[in-house]
């Protein structure tokens, strides 16, 4: 267990250093980057939107029902500003990336590993981390940040529609509460979280793929392990990042 953790940490450091080094030396495989970025967008965009819309709706229905009972319907916009933007958007993005894009990355690299393509690259002096992991890593970070903005927008729009047309909350009061409690730092936190989550999901998927055991069963087990481990790691990481951010930028109080 300790050895695996050390190997993952080594992969994280190697991937980060080699990605920056390849960019600085102008030897970064941009074609691979764009191919992987398009793959991630194609498998993740629609699921993230379809998940974020019910999330925004459920938040408004739960909070709005209680807020209407206590005579404070304007609370709906403030809660949506904090919860949907800060938490739902990056977490949904991370889960979809780890489940869809991460599993595809792990399966691809796992198949290359069991066919000895990775070993052949090492024999030829080509670093598989720089050639294969680095473009996927950068693509994961970029796509995660872009998807986070899309998920946040979809969640906020669905929450607004639910509040106005289902709970009959005034659109003006909703937007006023949202604008009063929403901070630019909230979007910055969500984007930062999404980038970190994309980095972690990509690295863990690549590590499990490069260390997959021989045979189709080994690749399947690696994909399953990568999704489970990434999901658990992302939730713990989200807790840590949220605690740090609340210390740096507390929730806005009027």
Image (cartoon, rainbow, N blue to C red):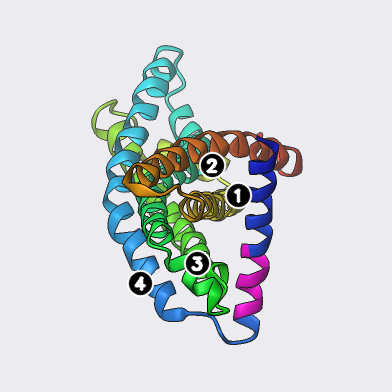
Please provide the residue range marked out in magenta.
Answer: 15-22
What residue did someone put label 3 on? 119
Determine the image quadrant of residue 129.
bottom right
What residue did someone put label 4 on? 35
Q: Position of residue 243 (x, y in %)?
A: 69, 35
What residue did someone put label 2 on? 86
Say which residue appears at 64% left-offset and 38% top-offset.
242
Label 3 environment density (alpha carbons within 10 Å; few <14, some 14–19, many ≥20):
some
Left or right, 35 with respect to 81, comes to: left
Say which residue appears at 60% left-offset and 49% top-offset.
189
Find the distance from the CA under tag 3 to the CA under tag 2. 42 Å
Find the distance from the CA under tag 3 to the CA under tag 4. 23 Å
Find the distance from the CA under tag 4 to the CA under tag 2. 30 Å
Find the distance from the CA under tag 4 to the CA under tag 1. 28 Å
Between disc 1 and disc 2, whose residue precedes? Answer: 2
Left or right, 237 with respect to 107, comes to: right
**Secondary-structure class at tag 4:** helix
Between disc 4 and disc 1, whose residue precedes? Answer: 4
């Amino acid at each position: 267990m300790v050895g695996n953790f050390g190997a993952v940490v080594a992969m994280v450091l190697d991937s980060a250093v080699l990605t920056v080094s390849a960019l600085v030396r102008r030897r970064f495989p941009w074609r691979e980057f764009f191919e992987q970025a398009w793959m991630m967008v194609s498998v993740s965009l629609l699921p993230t939107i379809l998940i974020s819309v019910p999330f925004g709706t459920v938040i408004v229905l739960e909070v709005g029902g209680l807020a209407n009972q206590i005579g404070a319907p304007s609370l709906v916009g403030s809660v949506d500003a904090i919860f949907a933007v800060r938490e739902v958007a990056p977490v949904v993005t991370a889960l979809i990336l780890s489940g869809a894009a991460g599993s595809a990355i792990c399966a691809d690299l796992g198949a290359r590993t069991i066919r000895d393509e990775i070993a052949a690259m090492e024999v030829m002096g080509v670093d598989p981390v720089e050639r294969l992991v680095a473009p996927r890593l950068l693509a994961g970070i970029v796509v995660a940040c872009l998807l986070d903005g899309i998920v946040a927008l979809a969640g906020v729009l669905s929450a607004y529609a639910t509040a106005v047309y289902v709970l009959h909350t005034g659109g003006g009061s909703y937007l006023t509460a949202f604008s009063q409690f929403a901070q630019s730092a909230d979007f910055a936190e969500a984007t930062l979280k999404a980038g970190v989550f994309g980095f972690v999901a990509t690295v863990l998927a690549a590590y499990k793929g490069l260390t997959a055991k021989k045979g189709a069963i080994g690749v399947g087990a690696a994909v399953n392990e990568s999704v489970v481990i990434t999901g658990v790691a992302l939730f713990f990481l989200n807790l840590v990042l949220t605690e740090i951010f609340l210390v740096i930028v507390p929730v806005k109080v009027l």
